[in-house]
Image (spheres, coloured by chain):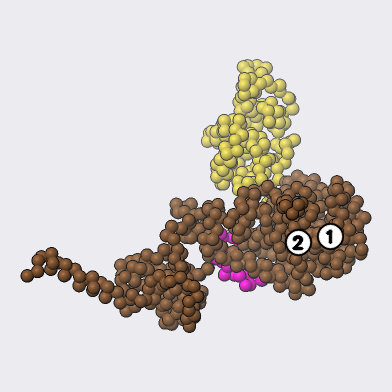
Chain colours: A yellow, B brown
Amino acid sequence: MAAAAELTLLEKSLGLSKGNKYSAQGERQIPVLQTNNGPSLTGLTTIAAHLVKQANKEYLLGSTAEEKAIVQQWLEYRVTRVDGHSNKDDIHTLLKDLNSYLEDKVYLTGYNFTLADILLYYGLHRFIVDLTVQEKEKYLNVSRWFCHIQHYPGIRQHLSIVVFIKNRLYTNSH
Amino acid sequence: MPSASQSRKSQEKPREIMDAAEDYAKERYGVSSMIQSQEKPDRVLVRVNDLTVHKADEVVWVRARVHTSRAKGKQCFLVLRQQQFNVQALVAVGDHASKQMVKFAANINKESIVDVEGVVRKVNQKIGSCTQQDVELHVQKIYVISLAEPRLPLQLDDAVRPEVEGEEEGRATVNQDTRLDNRVIDLRTSTSQAVFHLQSGICHLFRETLIHKGFVEIQTPKIISAASEGGANVFTVSYFKNNAYLAQSPQLYKQMCICADFEKVFCIGPVFRAEDSNTHRHLTEFVGLDIEMAFNYHYHEVVEEIADTLVQIFKGLQKRFQTEIQTVNKQFPCEPFRFLEPTLRLDYCEALAMLREAGIEMGDEEDLSTPNEKLLGRLVKEKYDTDFYILDKYPLAVRPFYTMPDPRNPKQSNSYDMFMRGEEILSGAQRIHDPQLLTERALHHGIDLEKIKAYIDSFRFGAPPHAGGGIGLERVTMLFLGLHNVRQTSMFPRDPKRLTP
């Protein structure tokens, strides 16, 4: 998904009615937002954080200092590790790591829904959509988290819904 | 007075004589002369399988292979192997064995065939590495009947080692090509023995069940004049001044037998498919077990007979070949085969719904791909707890031209597949027995009517409604045992890359 499209999606999910115009910069088409008062904002996560503040939903950036740091960590992870990597092996390593991480957490920061969940959901959608039933079962925690986020009101919008089977087909249940 | 060297010599000679004299067991071991049917000794050979505590303290003769032999001081431990079974044997210096005899035993090449006379003794601690765990054989006589060459192309212990264990402990396993290149040795392993004893059981149960149901066994020709199932995957042979083909299935002849009033027939024979597929489940030559049956009013009469035949086979295998199943499981662990009675039968549209619910997108008239078949197998297993089921009413578009269309829905057909562990084992259908409809369908499929004239002609003089199907012996063996490559269940497999042994 192109950055501008994603930011538009994010605007809607945050309940912002105003549609911003984004330009793209450089080889990697990094999004740029020209604000009315002040310098332009560059980069997906920078602009996203700005939009969150605009929508008066700063809690989505984390409440405690620790939580804020974790949100930043995952936003950075999204841009550096998820985007631009379409090598099959890389993705599976990523999913394996994410699966372990999510073992004991409902959301990326633990128990609170944040911007990190939204952007990681948007970033991973194109990979999750192509996973086989067996792979979805293998990355059980990622599947659980993804399924939860995609059902969050206002988040999924036009993105295709990914089907997750509730029963184990491949792992021995005992 | 004798010189120093002379006296030394005279001292050496007596020791030599003493050594020779000390081999008091000389007559009790050695390499026998080749058995050319010189004699008929009054001797009963006991099977290794029968060496149990019931025979404790008896003196028995056994013929087996030397699986291993290991000297330890004044003793030699041997493992003697006979098909799936093995027993520990001990040659120890004592009343019966001399140290030369112990040395001889320790040096017998692996795989040599030996005749052993010994006493069966109970052991205090179970011998975990042998099938006969409660006894060992105390050897009194040991003769080599057939000597093996010292260097084996593969080690049998490596050949039965489970793959995972091999990787973990850094120990060797044997890859498939090596096995197949040295098939005679590979077939000696307990696993291979078990597999092919069970396979023999499948053929036997197939015959037994169908004969009990009133079927007649027929033999059909394999050299035929025209390709039966479509020209692409057929082997050509030179037939005097012309060409002929190797039969891709007994289809045509099974049906002709029905038109000849044999009513219920089956045949077991080779099937030749020149398909350049290098997969885990394709062979260019395999054994087909085929059924064809005239029915009264509905093809389900036949479906139920076929399903019941397979169920009887499964039950028979579980009852009579439990030892073999366990032996194979030791090297290739898997879940026991599960099935329902009566057999589960799903409609194709139900299967489509299940797949769509799992997120798979498929058209109504689309055939099942192999990955989708496997996924469907998993879904069915999860929902119904069965490894065996029937899928009925396939879309007409994906079936051969001789398949009878569904009377109420022209997009469907009276055809069915059966699956084991998510893989197809049988494809069958009600056949079109009306020459006119058959011609119509053949034209619709773009088939040259000249090539199938003989086929259509067989239905011109009154043909009963009939249906049938066929299974592949190797594939059924593989799936029943939960194995993963059909070459493991074909004694001398044939594929696009292999023509020997």
Q: Residue furthest front?
A: B241
Marked residue chain, label 1: B
Q: Residue furthest left?
A: B1
Does residue A108 show up magenta in the picture? no
Indicate the secondary structure of the residue bearing disc 2.
loop
Number of the label disc, if any, that sits on residue B221? 2
> Which one is in front, A163 or B73?
B73
Pointer 1 and pointer 2: residues touching (CB < 8 Å)? Answer: no
Q: Is residue B437 among the parts visible in the rendering?
A: yes
> Residue at coordinates 89% horizontally, 58% vertically from top-left?
B457
> Residue at coordinates 62% horizontally, 67% vertically from top-left?
B198
The amino acid type of the residue labelled 1 equals: Gln
Image quadrant in which the C terminus of chain B is located? bottom right
- What span is colored magenta in the figure? B316-335
Q: Position of residue A128 (x, y in %)?
A: 66, 40
Q: Nearer the viewer, mark 1 or mark 2?
A: 2
Which secondary structure dominates the residues rendered in magenta?
Answer: helix
> Residue at coordinates 13% horizontally, 64% vertically from top-left?
B5
Q: Is residue B356 among the parts visible in the rendering?
A: no
CA gap, disc 1 and disc 2:
23 Å
Q: Reading the chain from its start, which is encountered first: label 1 or label 2?
A: 2
Label 1 sits on residue: B430
Marked residue chain, label 2: B
